Image (tube, helix red, strand yellow):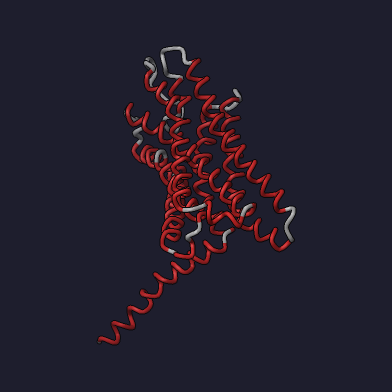
Amino acid sequence: MILFVILLLAYIVILGGNSMIIFVTLLDPKLSSPMFYFLHNLSFVDMVYTTTTIPNMLSSFLTDKLTISVPSCFLQMFFFIQLSVTGRGILTVMAYDRYLAICNPLRYAAVMTRPVQMLLVAGAWGFGVFCTLPATSMALQRSYCGSNVIQHGWCDLSSVRRLACTNTYVDNIVSLAFALVSLLTTGVLILTSYILIFVSLSKMAVAQRLKALGTCAAHLTVVSISYTAASFVYISYRVGNFSPEVRIIVSVLYSALTPFLNPMIYSLRNKELRGAIRRTLRRFRLPAVSAPKDVITHI
């Protein structure tokens, strides 16, 4: 029950915080810049990403039903990996957006049009499918025998692969190759964007430099947490001393950490978003306060 309560509270914060960001960025006309368009897409990905695993785990805590059908297992596997890669793709797009805004401000409005923004987000989703489909397709085609127990909190690809009857050496190579493609491609592009940004910042005045860093702070914090957590998960899978229970705990923390922290980080580090949240709350609070006055007047 302790684990259930902790995970439930985390899931409520994830859904509530990310829903608030989506709601505010879509309704507030002052948040019409590309940065907030990409942010609400990232929040949507985070919500769906955690929904692929957490509700099933919460249900198992209450009912002790620890089973999942084969089609549901492979669907969960595909969407969990695909949404993870898509989230990194959107973080990469956001890094490019910051590079363009800081290093080429005069061309920013002409380049970052709404069709380009939609194309970049679609590219992030397509990249997620490209990196996920080969390994999950190969896993689906394998025959499985013997134990049907997955040593994990959900249908993790490497955990399911251990149940296969056939040699999975090629599957491991393909899975590792596409995992490296997804991590290195996005990581190198984000790192390159920030190197160019810091080079450009070194040529600016102090006031301009601080303002530009303020727009990058939230994104840079999220990227650092995401890739640090991913590194810990990768190490836990490659080091033999870690028990399956430790790997599961590390994986659950990793899958929930970034979606949990994203709304808090952006709300704390972005003045425009904080102001929009206050305006939205004020808009919903005023009718509730004025309603009793109307009732008294009519009486």
- Residue farthest to the left, as pictured: 299
Q: Quadrant of residue 148?
A: top left
Give coordinates of residue 48: x percent, y percent.
41, 44
**Res. 2 in view:** no
Whether residue 22 is situated above or below residue 153 in the rendered picture:
below
Can residue 219 be seen here?
Answer: yes
The quadrant the C terminus occupies is bottom left
At which x and y percent is residue 231? 60, 34
In the picture, measured across the screen, residue 184 lies left or right of residue 27, that is right
Q: Which residue is pictured at 55% across the width and 48% down the height? A: 94
Snapshot quadrant of residue 64:
top left
Quadrant, the N terminus: top left
List x then y, in percent, for residue 135: 45, 24
User: Residue 270 versus residue 6: which sits nearer the camera?
Assistant: 270
Depth check, front residue: 127 or 50: 127
Between residue 288 and residue 78, name the one nearer to us: 78
